[in-house]
Image: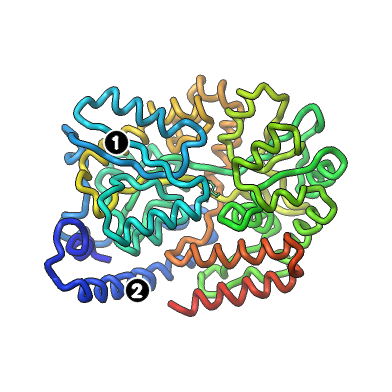
Amino acid sequence: MRPTQRATSGATGGRRHESVKRAERRRLTKAKLMSTAAILGCALAAGCGTSSSTTSSGNGETVVTPSMATNPKGSVTWCIGRDTTGAFSQVVGLYNRSHPGVHVRLLELSTSADQQRARLEQLEQAKSPQCDVLGIDVIWTAEFTAQGWLRDVTPAIQARAAQFIPSTLATTKIDGRYWAVPFNTNAGLLYYNKSKIHTAPTTWQQAYQMAKQGGGIAYQGRQYEGLTVDFLELLYSDHGSVLSPDGKKATIDSPQGRQVLAFMQQGIRTRAAPPAVLTYMEEESRNAFQTGKVALLRNWPYVYAQAKRAHMPFGVEPLPTFSGGRPASVLGGYNLGISSYSRNPGAALSFINFATAPAAQKKFFIASSLPAVITQVYSYPAVTEAQPFAGPLLRAVENGIPRPVTPLYPQISQAIYNNVYSALANDTSPQKALANAQTQITAVLERY
Ligand code: GLC
C-alpha cells in the first residue's frame, strides 16, 4: 500500500467518494496481502522480515520524520493492553514530567491480546483519531500495515536501528519499510515453586511428571492467542511447523503436531495441569502460581518482578524442550505504531522515542521485568542484578521463532487455538483437531 494513497484515505484528506476509497483500500489491501505472501516464506525462520528491498515512501505525508518530534506539543493518547506490570504508567509519568508541553494519556484496553486487537481494529476501521500511539502485538504488525493503519516510521528507526535486538526489530519491517518501533520483547519462561520442586525440569515431559506428583502446572489455556503461543512452544521444540517454508501450505497436521497435542491433552486428563487452565490467560495463571495452586508455571518474564514482590520461594529457567527436541521460544512482544488517523504524529513520535530509548527501557525492565528491546540494556549491571535471567532471556529472544508473518495471521491463529482448545477440553481427538486446523488454515490461505 502506498503511503500517498494511505494519506488520502486518512485524516488528511478524502474528498473522493467513500465507496471509491473503499474499493481502492480493498485493492491495496489485496495487493499488500499478495506481496506479503512472499514474506510467508520466511515466516518460520528467525530473522524473517528483514528484506532489504525498499518501497517508495510516496509523498512523505504519512512518513513520520525525526524532525517532527522536536518541540512536541499538545496531547497524545497511547492505546495498549491493560497495564498489568505498571510499566506503561511508569513510562507515561516519566515522559509527562520531562515534557511540559505535551500530555500523554494512557488508554488501557483488555488484558486479552485478541480483544485488544478487536478494539484497535474497530477504532482504525472507523478512522478514529482517538489513539495516536497504538500498542500492537508483534503478530499484528503485518495486518495493521496492510490495512494502512500505521504511518511509516522508517527514518526514525534508521537513525537507531543498530540499538535494537535484531529479531525484535524484524517484526516491524514489511517490504523494506519500518511501520512501528519495538517497545517490549518477550519469550516464555518456566517458573517453579521451590518449596515443592527442587530441581528445574529440562524437558516438558519431566515438567508434567513433576507436576503430576507435586501440585500441577499452569499455562494459558483459554481460547485466545496465548494458547496458540503455548502450543507452538512445544510444537516448535518438537520440530513441527504451522506453514511450509514457502508459506503456501498448512503443515500443522503432522506427526509432531499430533504428538504434542496428545501430550497436552493427556496433561489435563491426568490432572498434571488442572482443568482450570482452560480458563486461564496470563494473569489467572500467575495468580494460580503465586497462591500455591500450582507448582510450575509457563508465563512471560513480567511474572518475575511480581512473584518476587510476593516474597515466594521460586526459581525460573528458560523453557524446557519437548523430549528429544530443540530449545524453542515463540517471539512475543509489542511494537508502538503511529496511527494513520493521529492528529499529532510528531508528539506521538517524541513519546515513542522516549519510551524506547535505553534510559526508559532500563527503568521499566528493572521495575517490572518487562523485557527491553535494546540489546545493550541486558548488560547493564543494575539490570542483571534485578533480573538474573537477563542473559538467557536475551538469547531466547535473539533466537525466538516468529509466529507466521502475514496479515492473515489472526485467522490462522484462531484456527490453531480453537482446535487445540477443543482437544484440551476433550471435545475432540488430537487427530481430528489438527485435521480441522489444517483445513481451516488452508481455507484462509486459499482465500487470498
Ligand atoms: C504477550 C506477548 C504477545 C503474545 C501474548 C499472548 O503479551 O508479548 O506477543 O501474543 O502475550 O497472550
Identity, as a three-letter code, of the amino acid under mark 1: Phe
Q: Which residue is mark 1?
A: 351
- Label 2 amino acid? Lys
Residue 430: name its quadrant: bottom right
Residue at image location 25% in from the left, 32% down from the top: 103
Q: Residue placed at 49% from the left, 42% from the top? A: 185
Q: Horizontally, is 207 left or right of 312 in the view?
A: right
Q: Position of residue 434 (x, y in %)?
A: 68, 70
- Is 61 left or right of 178, judged from the image as shown? left
**Quarter residue 238 falls in:** bottom right
- The residue tagged with tag 1: helix, strand or loop? helix
Quarter of the figure with residue 144: bottom left
Which residue appears at 14% of the width and 61% of the height? Answer: 13
Which quadrant of the rendered structure holds the C terminus? bottom left
Q: Residue furthest right?
A: 213
Image position, residue 125 (x, y; %): 32, 62
Instruction: Calculate the distance from the C-alpha at mark 2 to the C-alpha at mark 1.
Output: 32 Å
Marked residue nearer the N-terminal end (2 or 1): 2
Q: Residues within 10 Å of mark 2 (few under 14, many from 20)?
A: some
Please say if the residues under marks 2 and 1 sit with CB atoms less than 8 Å apart. Answer: no
In the picture of the structure, the residue carrying the numbered disc 2 is 30
Task: Tell me the SS state at disc 2.
Answer: helix
Above or below, 299 relative to 102? below
Q: Residues within 10 Å of mark 1 (few under 14, many from 20)?
A: many
Please state if 170 lies on the left or on the right of 191 as rendered: left
Does residue 42 appear in the picture of this structure? Answer: no
Q: Position of residue 329 (x, y in %)?
A: 61, 48
Res. 431 visible in picture = yes
Residue for point 83% across, 41% down? 210
Q: Is residue 197 left or right of residue 241?
A: right
Question: Which image quarter is the N terminus in?
Answer: bottom left
**In this view, 259 is above or below 230:** below
